[in-house]
Image: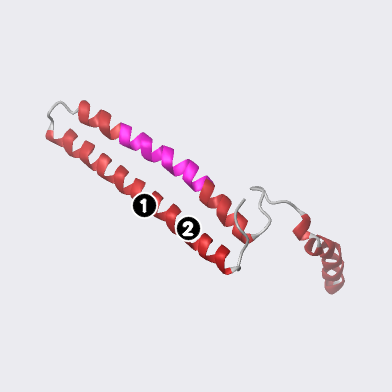
């Protein structure tokens, strides 16, 4: 009885597994490489504006510190970490693009659209 339920369930789900490649993904990619390209694109769209917001916040903290050592230290720390975050985002995007170009030129994957 237990095995017959498992057999019926597997037969019902088998067409879904076979035809799984025809269903679109939520981010609209067909291959693994195109999914990586979309993820890189979306990460850049999210991270770069956040970096700009934190740089502006650090600038405001500097302006409104009014000579207080603690507030100056906080503003300097905010700006330092915002610049470090900006560099990390740029290096990550550049590294991902280098790997993508290497794989594209070697013929391992198709180019991003």
Is mark 1 in CB contact (under 8 Å) with mark 2?
Answer: no
Residue 112 at x, y = what percent? 60, 54
15 lies above or below 76: below
Image quadrant in which you'd find residue 51: top left
**The residue positioned farthest toward the front in the image shown:** 105
Give the residue displayed 16% in from the left and 36% down from the top.
70
The numbered dot on residue 96 is 2
* Closest to the observer, 109 or 55: 109
* Closest to the observer, 7 or 88: 88
For marks 1 and 2 on the same chain, the one whose residue lies earlier in the sequence: 1
What element does badge 2 sit on? helix
Q: Is residue 53 left or right of residue 37?
A: left
Q: Main secondary structure of the magenta part?
A: helix
Give the residue displayed 52% in from the left and 61% down from the top.
101
Q: Is residue 73 left or right of residue 41?
A: left
Label 1, label 2: how far apart the Cα atoms are: 12 Å
**Residue placed under numbered mark 1 in the picture:** 88
Image quadrant in which you'd find residue 65: top left
23 lies above or below 68: below
Q: Residues within 10 Å of mark 2 (few under 14, many from 20)?
A: some
* Closest to the observer, 68 or 104: 104
Mark 1 vs mark 2, foreground winner is: 2
Q: Which residues make up the magenta segment?
A: 42-56
């Amino acid at each position: 009885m237990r095995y017959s339920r498992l057999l019926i369930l597997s037969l019902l789900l088998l067409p879904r597994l076979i035809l799984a490649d025809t269903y679109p993904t939520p981010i609209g990619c067909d291959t693994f490489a195109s999914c990586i390209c979309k993820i890189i694109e979306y990460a850049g769209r999210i991270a770069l504006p956040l970096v700009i917001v934190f740089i502006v916040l650090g600038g405001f903290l500097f302006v409104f510190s009014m000579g207080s050592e603690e507030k100056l230290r906080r503003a300097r720390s905010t700006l330092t970490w915002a610049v470090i975050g900006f560099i990390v985002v740029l290096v990550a995007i550049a590294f991902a693009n280098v790997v993508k170009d290497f794989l594209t030129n070697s013929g391992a994957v198709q180019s991003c659209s």
